[in-house]
Structure formats: C-alpha cells, structure tokens
Amino acid sequence: MITSSLMVAGDKEKHLDKINDLKCGIAIINLEDGVFDKKYALELLLKKFGSNGLRVANKQIVVRINPLSSTGCDEIKVINTLRPNAIRVSKIRTIEDVEKALELIDETIEVHLSIETKEALDNLSKLKCEKRVTTVYLGILDMLESLGLPQSLLELDNPTIDYILSKFLIDSHIAGFKAVSFTFQDYKDTDKFTQWCKKEKKMGFSCKSCISPAQVRIANEIFGISEDEILKAKYIKEIFEQQKSLGITGFSDLKYGFIDEPIYKDALLVLGLNKY
C-alpha cells in the first residue's frame, strides 16, 4: 500500500543519488516548480539514468514535467527513453490535455495528473479516459490561486479547504484514481503536518505528498495499516468465505459481531484486494 509521495529535486545530483534509499512509496523527480535550470535537470537525468532507466524494485519512480503548453512536450520525448513508472503532467485543465499527454507518453508508462486548476477540479471525475491514467495529486496552493482565493485559507478548520479536499477525494474515487493529498510546505513544522495527515486519514485519504524524509516517516505511520487491522481483515475474509460456501452471507460472529457482504468487502479493501 502506497502511503507517501516524496518530491525529489531533479537538478540536485545528491538527491537523485538517494532515490533507492528513500522510504516513500512514490519518488517524484521534479522538473517543474522550484527547478530553475530545467534543461540542466533533464540532462542530469540522462547522465545518471540513461543506461539503466528509471525503475527500482521498492518504489514507483515518477517524473513531474512542466505544462504541455511550456516545455512538457519536449521533456516527454527524453523521459520516454528512461522508462519511469509514470510521468506526472502539470497544469492539466481538460480531457483534451490528458489525451494529448497519452499520445506523447510511451504506452508502457503510466500517466499521473497534477490537479491544480479550477478547470481540472471541475472535470476531475471525467479525466480517466484510459487505464494508464492512474493517479492524481492535489496542488492546493495553485488551486487556490486558480480559484482567486488567498493562501491564508489553508487552515485545518477552514470549510472551503474541507470542501476542496472532499471534492478532490470523492471525484477521484468516482473516476477510479488513486488520490494523493497536497504538499504541506513548512517541512519544519512536523506537528502541523501530523495534524493534517490525521485529518486527511479521517476523511478517507490514503496517501500524502511530502517534501522531506521526516514528513515521509509521519505519513507512512499515519496512513499505514496496523497489524491488528490486517489480522482482523484476514479473519473476516476467511470466515465470510467459509460461510458463503455454505450459502450464508449474513451471520453473527462471536469475535466481531454481525458480518455480511459489505463488511467482507471492506476487509478486502484493507487487504488491498478490492479497489474501491
């Protein structure tokens, strides 16, 4: 189960050297915001990974490119040769943007989308136009700017932020996307980051975008599934399947009370055997 996504600076060789050791489920090599010399970053990727490609055994490697209207199209041509697990496309607005990305990105590579414009948020449930489009990331600061709203709204108890998070999550699940919640920029404030993770876990999120190893550790702990939850889910799966073989799909269990098909399906979800 992937619980954390970590941004890795594409123009910093020492950061790229540590990719194998990172504890995140997704490593995002960033070529967009925060990278001044984007041409150098692309050349660095070719230099370091051109011979072996961009795949490792213990995590997904994703390259975050610039918008297609900027340098994104040229970047895709280079990144296709490196065969990462996915390419993340910035500033998506419409299904036509997604279709254009699909035409350019090699068919062996997944397509991930940055949802950071009001148009993308409005169209989100319709953007999964092909099975290769698997994952969406909420860019909350760009989203607020796109909506004409101040960044000062980004507080734990703000109802507008709650609505944006809820809409992003529900529409993502309607479409069949994996939804990754937004990046908390103040990486030194681990207490507030922890509060955001706990809030998002309660809302239904299962993965958080991070910008530091400390954030990754917190996200993995909060969004991870405990051993007790796994044991309970395995028990429910086993006993339900036993009873179903006898023609019984609703029964009272001494350990966990009433068990029926919805309870069974939730156990499968915990075990990663039932995707929404």
Image: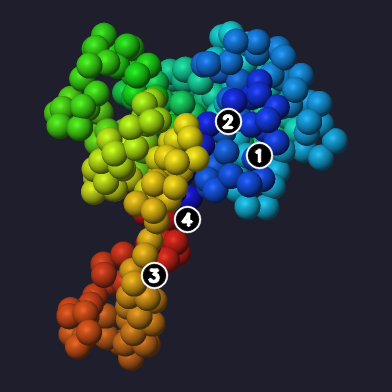
Whether label 3 touches label 4, CB < 8 Å: no
At label 2, the amino acid type is Val
- How is colour applied across the structure in the image? rainbow
At label 4, the amino acid type is Met
Nearer-N-terminus badge (2/1): 2
Circle 2 sits on which residue? Answer: 8
Nearer-N-terminus badge (1/3): 1
Say what secondary structure mark 3 lies in.
Answer: helix
- Alpha-carbon span between mark 2 and mark 4: 20 Å
Seen at 44% across and 61% down, the residue is 272
Say what secondary structure mark 4 lies in.
Answer: loop
Circle 4 sits on which residue? Answer: 1
At label 3, the amino acid type is Glu
Whether label 2 touches label 4, CB < 8 Å: no
Circle 3 sits on which residue? Answer: 227
At label 1, the amino acid type is Lys
> Of all residues shown, which one is farthest toward the right?
51
Q: Position of residue 237 (x, y in %)?
A: 37, 77
Of circles 1 and 3, which is in front?
1
- Alpha-carbon span between mark 2 and mark 1: 9 Å
**Of 203 and 237, the residue lying toward us:** 203
Mark 2, Cα crowd under 10 Å, few <14 / some 14-19 / many 20+, is: many
Q: Quadrant of residue 264?
A: bottom left
Whether label 2 touches label 3, CB < 8 Å: no
Nearer-N-terminus badge (3/4): 4
Q: Position of residue 193 (x, y in %)?
A: 32, 37
Q: Quadrant of residue 111?
A: top right
- Alpha-carbon span between mark 2 and mark 3: 30 Å
